Image: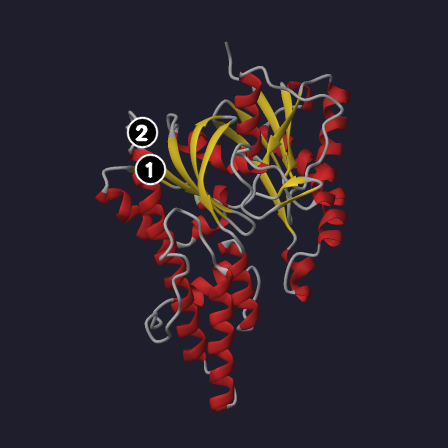
Amino acid sequence: MPDKILLGLESSCDDTAAAVLRGREILSSVVMGQTELHAAFGGVVPEIAARAHAEKLDLAVEQSVAQAGISLHDVDAVAVTAGPGLIGGVLSGVMMAKGLAAGLGKPLVGVNHLAGHALTPRLTDGLSYPYLMLLVSGGHCQFLIVRGAQDFTRLGGTIDDAPGEAFDKTARLLGLPQPGGPSVEATAVGADERRFAFPRPLLDREGCDLSFSGLKTALLRLRDRLVEAQGGLHEADRADLCAGFQAAVRDVLREKTRRALALYLAEAPAEPAFAIAGGVAANQAIRAALETLCAEHGVRFTAPPLRLCTDNAAMIAYAGSELLAAGETSDMALSARPRWPLDRSAAPLLGSGKKGAKA
C-alpha cells in the first residue's frame, strides 16, 4: 500500500507554514516568517500574527503544493495544528484546514503542536518507541517519555519561563535583535562565561522540573550594576553576560536531562534514545552538552535538522499521518485550543483555568 500524502498546516505562533509529506519523505516545506512585522515591539504581537496568518496561509499552501509537484486533489488528508498556541493564529489555521478538507472531501486531522515537535525524531531518524524527548522552545520546556503518537509521560518541565522566552527577554535587556536565541548565542561566541555569577535554579530540588525566570532577573541586576558603575555597557560586558546566561541554561538542562535519563533508563527500553526538539534545540552549546551526556550513558542522541527544530508544517503533517494510520481523524467541530497538555494525567505545571491546564 503506497504511503499517504499529507498536507500539513502550522500557524500557532509567528510562522505561517505548509508542507506536503509522503510517508516520511518531505516533498515540500514552506515557512513564512513574521520577524519584520514584530521587530519594533520586542516580541510577538498576537493580533498582528493572527492577521498575517490569515493573509499568508493560502499562499503557503499554494507554494507547498506547487513545490511538491502535486495537485490538491492528490492529498489524502489535511493535518493542522489545533493548539496549543496564540488562539488567533491557531484559529486561522484550523478554519483554513476545514475549508480545504471539506472542499476536497478529504479527512481532517487536528494535531497537538507539541506532539508535532515530540514526533519529529520519528520523521527524521525513525526512532522506535519509547524514547526520551526534551521539548525546549520559546513557549515550552518539558521532558517526555514518548510511547506513542498520543501516549506521553511527562517527567518534568518549566514552572515559569521557557528557555526560549528567557533568551528573548535576555536579548531585549541587552539591546540585541529578536529572535533572542540566535542573537544571544552569536554574541556569546568567544566570551567569558565565568565572569559573572549566574544561579543554576532548582538544582537543589529533586526531580526534573526547571525554572528560568530567575536567570533573567539575575541578568537584569548584573546589567544595572554595570550601567551604574561605568555609565553604560561595553561590548565585552554584553558578550560576557550572554555567555554566562547561556552557560547557566546549558548547565541546568544538562543536569535535569541526567535525572530524566535515569528515570527513562530504569524502564529498560530496548533501543534507548534521547531526542531534543524545539527552537532552542538549535543552540549549539546546549546540543553539544547533551550529546556528550548521552554518550556517557550509552544512549543514542538525535536532534532534527535546524530547519525542523523551529515551527514548521512538516512535523504537523507527520504527526497527522501517525494519527491517520491509527484511525484518528477530526470532524468539522474541531476547535482551536490555546492550551493542550500532552500528558493529561499529569498535574498542571503552570496552573489551570476555565480553558484547562496550561502545560
**In the image, is residue 236 above or below residue 130?**
below
- Residue pointed to by mark 1: 263
Rate crowding at label 1 as few (under 14), some (14 to 19) or many (20 or more) other CA atoms within 10 Å: some
The answer to whether marks 2 and 1 mark residues whose Cβ atoms lie closer than 8 Å is yes
Q: In front here: 151 or 207? A: 207
| Separation of residues labelled 2 and 1 (CA atoms) | 7 Å
Dot 1 falls on a residue whose secondary structure is helix
Spot occupied by residue 217 in the image (x, y as percentages of width and height):
51, 69
Q: How was this image coloured?
A: secondary structure
User: Relative to 101, is 185 on the left or the right?
Assistant: left
Q: In front here: 63 or 183? A: 183
- Residue at 68%, 66% in the rendered image: 40
Question: Residue 267 falls in which quadrant of the image?
Answer: top left
**In the image, is residue 209 above or below residue 324?**
below
Disc number placed over residue 139 in the picture, else none: none
- Residue pointed to by mark 2: 267
Res 202 seen here: yes
Q: In front here: 147 or 110? A: 147
Spot occupied by residue 213 in the image (x, y as percentages of width and height):
51, 61
- Residue at 28%, 28% in the rendered image: 268
Question: Residue 356 falls in which quadrant of the image?
Answer: top right
- Residue at 57%, 48% in the rendered image: 350
**In the image, is residue 191 above or below residue 299?**
below
Res 180 seen here: no
Amino acid marked by disc 1: Leu
Spot occupied by residue 248 in the image (x, y as percentages of width and height):
38, 62
